[in-house]
Image: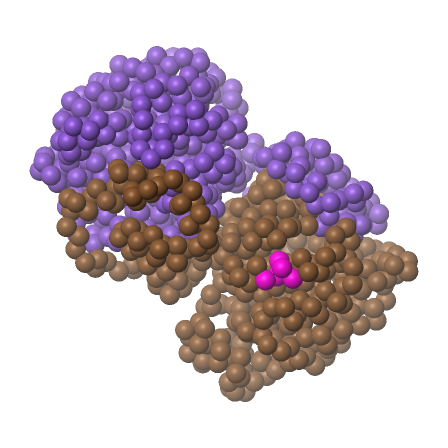
Chain colours: A brown, B purple
């Protein structure tokens, strides 16, 4: 287990690989993993995985959600989505399949990509139960068996909504939300708790969950079932009540050397983002923060790649470690392959913009390379450095430009003009801010 | 003139219209315009214009750039871009035409849209001169005659790069930039100053410019010819040297009752944005701040609608008043009609996300309406409230959803599920943050 080894001061091959990829000394990884501030999600049984570190001081990572739905269950297409996501920079993939043969989807996706894979086993537990009755008829065994099945298949991290508890539901009732629960797994558990008047098994039997996680070095992603589903519900008592519970569970996980991250909103006005990140880091003692979005306005369905790009960039700049891709189809439909690509690129832009703040030159040197390519009107180099070389090339060519630099200014290119009149000294300035 | 009337305490029909549109008492407009913190760009000769207020306390406005290029000069298409921009929420349009019949383009655009129209007359001055020689052969008369011609046609605001001065160019030389000057108008003037070893006529003869502006109540948009063209050049001495000059000119304009706004970056790392806005507001005594982007990474050509959406949202939340649309084709080519639409929508999202912070309920009530439409699974209402109803409807339908809420969760819709188990109280919470 990564955390056990880190606490003992033993470097694992995964730590070594992450240290190299991030340009950090391996001691940085050791200290971070031992303290819980960094994680390397990797199931001991997973094969052919290019590991990723997530957490403070590392490059901001992004996850792309894929998965079948009851209305449309085409595993080949989900695999295509997973591949395009990785191609455009997704660091991990989560399989959220809820339609068709869920086991088959997960197993094929695990073989199709070499990035860490996450799942939300409660979906499968609930859906299988719902086929013989009602979701609220799930037993504790149904839930844990689903988690075990996913872990046995080699899943590297699972979302577990352990913080959806009786007390969180009481807070939800007091909160007067416009949209009660928008988390799918959260809604399964909230309905279950209300119907059965019992405590959430993932909370009540958290020690058992930890035992299970230890068996596979399965990373737990503590889900935010109470995340706000609209700006009006942001940062309310239900959300923070759940976060307090998650903070407690983080420490219990660490005591058993189980790697954890904490999931966060969701929908937040711009001016709530900093506070949400800081509170998570405080309450959860620096555990990596994994945010879905946040999207910063509710009125742009069809463009939630943009709304979440804004929120994601800001969250990551303030310290969020892991961004979940939001596609243009969010709130409307299962995303298409193109939607996934659009979402991944917006999230990558957000992560990179934040990394320029968090990591300085290590991230911004790419931007400086692009600036130099622009200064020398070297188009091939610009395309090569672009986050989406094919699109950059296509737009440039489509612009009907002939010999001129680009079809926007044509022969009146400012870069070309000034180069005639100003001798360029060697750039000497260092960014110090 | 709006400012003269405001200083006298006289309400103009334009102030009245803006006060109504913004839900503000007309005294707010009077005080703001008198103090220069607000502007209503409207040429006294412009007909059929739906006026807009720009500045502190008002809704964040967005401008869409259109215009022919030397490589592609199709005025009909530029008019189509202008119309689609206005349809998707552009509050103003700037005609940046530099190809074909520039006068005809401008005049037709002024007739085609009813929003305030801006231009950059130095382009036409330089281009006409370049047809008989070199751009650096422009005379002071060439420049002022172009401005007069635009004003006579009814243009409501013009970008004038008055801050590109000898001292700014000295600062530029010291600065060691990767990309010297990326402003088209800025490059014309910088080349002119270097070549002729003379001071910028727009600076030297600023009093004459003010007289000209007074004749038409032409609003001056003080251009940022020294704006950084890449992250590495952000917030450098050249940029701030120019800003200091602009701050001085703002006061001189106010003394003559000429309305002004100040243009700003450009390319900025996320953590430079707040400071850039605050410095502009400080140095320019609260004059409205008009930003181009800022884009927050250089490596995403093809997606600068997203990079500028991130920077624009943050700028506006910190106090920028006016966002210039950046399209996906920026840095690559003249934008297409679709590119303009994509850019406008990203800027509108940014402006609205910021207005939720700046204006509170006045802006966020739309988001709450959307949340209620989602809670009741009222799709028609969701489409109606969406920033792009057609796209939202198309994606939802394309998702192959039949009777279920949407094809992402299908019958496992969390909203639908929880509604069965949780009686919903009337929402009672007020946002107080």
Could you tell me residue B84's position as x and y percent?
A: 50, 29
Instruction: State the quadrant of the N terminus of chain A.
Output: bottom right
Residue furthest to the right in view is A132
Q: Is residue A93 above or below residue A226?
A: below
The foreground one among A148 and A358 is A148
Please say whether residue A81 is one of the residues in the magenta stretch: yes
Is residue A388 at least partly visible in the picture? yes
Residue B20: x, y in percent?
51, 19
> Which image quadrant: the C terminus of chain A?
bottom left
Q: Residue at x 17, y 39 (%)?
A: B191
Residue B118 drawn above or below residue A399? above
Please indicate whether residue B17 sits to the left or right of residue A231 in the image.
left
**SS assignment for the magenta stretch, majority:** helix
Above or below residue A117? Residue B289 is above
Residue A23 vs residue B2, the one in the foreground: A23
Where residue A155 appears, as percent x and y from the top left, is 67, 72
Q: Residue at x 88, y 56 (%)?
A: A134
Between A244 and A11, which is closer to the camera in this rendering? A11
When asked about the image quadrant of residue A219, the answer is: bottom right
Q: Is residue B75 left or right of residue A268?
A: left
Outermost residue, front side: A402
Q: Nearer the viewer, residue B82 or A204?
A: B82
Magenta residue check for A254: no
Q: Which residues are magenta?
A: A79-83
Which residue is depicted at the point 49% across and 63% down?
A60
């Amino acid at each position: 287990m990564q955390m056990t080894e880190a606490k003992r001061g033993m470097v694992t091959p995964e730590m070594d690989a992450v240290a190299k990829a991030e340009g950090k000394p391996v001691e940085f990884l050791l200290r971070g993993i031992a303290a819980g501030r960094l994680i390397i999600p990797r199931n001991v049984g997973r094969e052919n995985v290019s590991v990723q570190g997530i957490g403070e001081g590392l490059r901001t990572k992004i996850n792309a959600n894929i998965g079948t739905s009851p209305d449309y269950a085409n595993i080949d297409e989900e695999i295509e989505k997973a591949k395009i996501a990785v191609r455009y920079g997704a660091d991990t993939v989560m399989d959220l399949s809820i339609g068709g043969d869920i086991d088959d989807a997960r197993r094929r996706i695990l073989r199709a990509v070499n990035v860490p894979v996450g799942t939300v086993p409660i979906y499968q537990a609930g859906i299988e139960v719902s086929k013989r009755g009602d979701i609220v008829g799930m037993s504790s065994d149904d839930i844990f068996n689903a988690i075990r099945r996913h872990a046995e298949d080699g899943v590297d991290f699972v979302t577990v909504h352990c913080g959806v508890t009786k007390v969180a539901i009481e807070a939800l009732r007091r909160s007067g939300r416009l949209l009660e629960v928008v988390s799918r797994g959260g809604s399964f558990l909230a309905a279950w708790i209300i119907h059965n008047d019992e405590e959430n098994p993932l909370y009540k039997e958290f020690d058992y969950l930890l035992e299970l996680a230890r068996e596979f070095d399965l990373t737990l992603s503590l889900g935010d079932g109470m995340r706000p589903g609209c700006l009006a519900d942001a940062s309310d008592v239900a959300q923070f009540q759940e976060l307090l519970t998650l903070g407690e569970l983080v420490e219990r996980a660490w005591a058993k050397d189980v790697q954890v991250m904490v999931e966060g909103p969701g929908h937040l006005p711009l001016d709530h983002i900093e506070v949400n990140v800081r509170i998570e880091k405080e309450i959860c003692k620096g555990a990596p923060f994994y945010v879905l979005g946040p999207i910063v306005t509710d009125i742009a369905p069809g463009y939630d790649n943009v709304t979440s790009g804004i929120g994601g960039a800001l969250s990551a700049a303030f310290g969020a470690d892991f961004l979940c891709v939001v596609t243009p189809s969010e709130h409307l439909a299962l995303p298409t392959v193109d939607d996934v690509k659009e979402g991944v690129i917006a999230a990558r832009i957000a992560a990179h913009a934040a990394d320029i703040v968090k990591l300085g030159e290590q991230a911004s040197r790419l931007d400086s390379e692009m600036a130099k390519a622009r200064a020398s009107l070297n188009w091939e180099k610009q395309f090569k450095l672009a986050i989406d070389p094919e699109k950059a090339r296509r737009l440039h060519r489509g612009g009907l430009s002939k010999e001129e630099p680009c079809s926007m200014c044509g022969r009146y290119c400012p870069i070309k003009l000034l180069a005639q009149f100003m001798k360029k000294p060697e750039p000497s300035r260092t960014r110090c801010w």
